[in-house]
Image (cartoon, grey):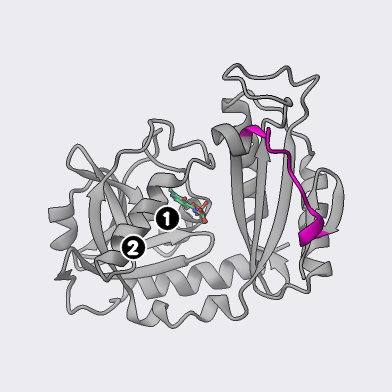
C-alpha cells in the first residue's frame, strides 16, 4: 500500500480523503504536474515547480506550498514508497467551500486542496516501445483555449486515447485549423531532412518541460530546430516523428493515420534525442 500526501499529512492511500464538495471534483477546478523519478531522483523538478506556480497564478488560485516544501514532499514520497523509477502526480484544487457554486470561494476561507501520490514504474526508461515506436491517429482538437494551463480537465484527451485504442493504435495527435497542436498528453514533433519541427509556444499547447529540455539539448548538439505549425499531411511526409513528455521522455512515432514514416522504424533523430535527454536529465536529477 502506498503512502500518499493530502493537505499536510502522509497517509496510507486508503485513508486519504477529499470532500465531495471539492472544486476539483465538481468543476475540474484544479491543476496538476507529473514529475518523473529515475534512480530515486526527480527529473526536471525546477521546471515542473515553475510551471505549477504559473498555472496557479493564471487561475488566481492560492499556492499552498513553497518550492522548498514541494521538493521535500516529493522526496519524502519517493523515500517512503521506495521509488526507484516512476512518477509523482501532484494536484492542487481550489478546495472545498462546503457547497456547489460557480463563483470562486474566498481563498481566506477555503484553502486549496493539495494531494500527491507516487506511481511505481520499474525500468520505465527502458520501455521496449522506444525501440519500435508509436502508431498514432489524428483527431480534431476540441479542447478549451487555455491549454498552456495544466488543468485537470482531461476528459477530451482521455477520449482521444480511447479513439486511438479503438483504432488499434497507441495515441492521437490533435489537429486544429489544419495544424497539429500536440498529442493527447505530450508535445508533437516531426523531422524532415534532419530539421526538427514543432509548434511554437502559445496558449494552444502545454509548454512541456520535457520539450524545453529537449530543444535545448538539440540546439547544443547542433541540430536544426524550427518552431512553426505543421499539418498532418506534412507529418505523413516527414522522415521521422516523435513526442515528448515527463512520462514518455522522447518517444518515436512511426505511423500516422496508417501511413508509415520513412522506413517505418524510429529513425535516427528521435532515438539520439532520447539518449541525450535521459543521460543529461539523470545527471541533473535532484
Ligand atoms: N502530460 N501536452 C499535454 C497536453 C500534456 O498533457 C503533457 C504532459 C505534455 C508534455 O509536458 P511535459 O513534458 O511537461 O510532461 C504536453 C503528462 C505527462 C500527463 O498528463 O500525464
Please tell me in which quadrant of the rendered image residue 13 appears.
bottom right
Residue drawn at the location 39% of the way across and 34% of the way down: 202
For the residues bearing labels 2 and 1, Cβ distance under 8 angstroms: yes
Quarter occupied by the N terminus:
bottom right
Quadrant for the C terminus in the image: bottom right
Q: How many numbered marks are there?
A: 2
Measured as percent of width and height from the top left, residue 44 is found at 62, 56
Which circle marks residue 260 in the picture? none
Mark 2 sits near ligand 1, with its Cβ under 8 Å away: no
Image point 56% across, 76% down: which residue? 124
Residue 186 numbered tag: 1
Instruction: Please provide percent x and percent y for residue 196.
Output: 30, 58
Give the mark toward the camera: 2 or 1.
Answer: 2
Residue 134 drawn above or below residue 147 = below
Image location of residue 63, percent across then percent down: 73, 33
In the rendered view, does 136 fall on the left or right side of 81? left
Residue wearing tag 2? 171
Asked whether mark 1 lies closer than 8 Å to ligand 1, one says yes
Amino acid at each position: 500500500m502506498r503512502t500518499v500526501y493530502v493537505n499536510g499529512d502522509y497517509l496510507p492511500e486508503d485513508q486519504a480523503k477529499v470532500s465531495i464538495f471539492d472544486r476539483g471534483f465538481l468543476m475540474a477546478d484544479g491543476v496538476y504536474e507529473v514529475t518523473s523519478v529515475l534512480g530515486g531522483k526527480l527529473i526536471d523538478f525546477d521546471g515542473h515547480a515553475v510551471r505549477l506556480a504559473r498555472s496557479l497564478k493564471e487561475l488566481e488560485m492560492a499556492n499552498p506550498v513553497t518550492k522548498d516544501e514541494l521538493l521535500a514532499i516529493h522526496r519524502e514520497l519517493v523515500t517512503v514508497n521506495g521509488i526507484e523509477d516512476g512518477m509523482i502526480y501532484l494536484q492542487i484544487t481550489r478546495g472545498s467551500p462546503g457547497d456547489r457554486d460557480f463563483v470562486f470561494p474566498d481563498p481566506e476561507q477555503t484553502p486549496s486542496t493539495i494531494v500527491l501520490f507516487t506511481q511505481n514504474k520499474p525500468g520505465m526508461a527502458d520501455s521496449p516501445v522506444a525501440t519500435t515506436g508509436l502508431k498514432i491517429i489524428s483527431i480534431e482538437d476540441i479542447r478549451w483555449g487555455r491549454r498552456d494551463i495544466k488543468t485537470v480537465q482531461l476528459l477530451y484527451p482521455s477520449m482521444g486515447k480511447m479513439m486511438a485504442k479503438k483504432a488499434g493504435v497507441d495515441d492521437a495527435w490533435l489537429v486544429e485549423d489544419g495544424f497539429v497542436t500536440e498529442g493527447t498528453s505530450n508535445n508533437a514533433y516531426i523531422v524532415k531532412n534532419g530539421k526538427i519541427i514543432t509548434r511554437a509556444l502559445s496558449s494552444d499547447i502545454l509548454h512541456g518541460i520535457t520539450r524545453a529540455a529537449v530543444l535545448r539539448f538539440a540546439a547544443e548538439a547542433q541540430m536544426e530546430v524550427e518552431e512553426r505549425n505543421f499539418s498532418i499531411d506534412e507529418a505523413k511526409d516527414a522522415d521521422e516523428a516523435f513526442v515528448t513528455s515527463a512520462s514518455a521522455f522522447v518517444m518515436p512515432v512511426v505511423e500516422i493515420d496508417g501511413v508509415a514514416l520513412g522506413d517505418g522504424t524510429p529513425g535516427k533523430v528521435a532515438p539520439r534525442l532520447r539518449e541525450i535527454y535521459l543521460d543529461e536529465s539523470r545527471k541533473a536529477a535532484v
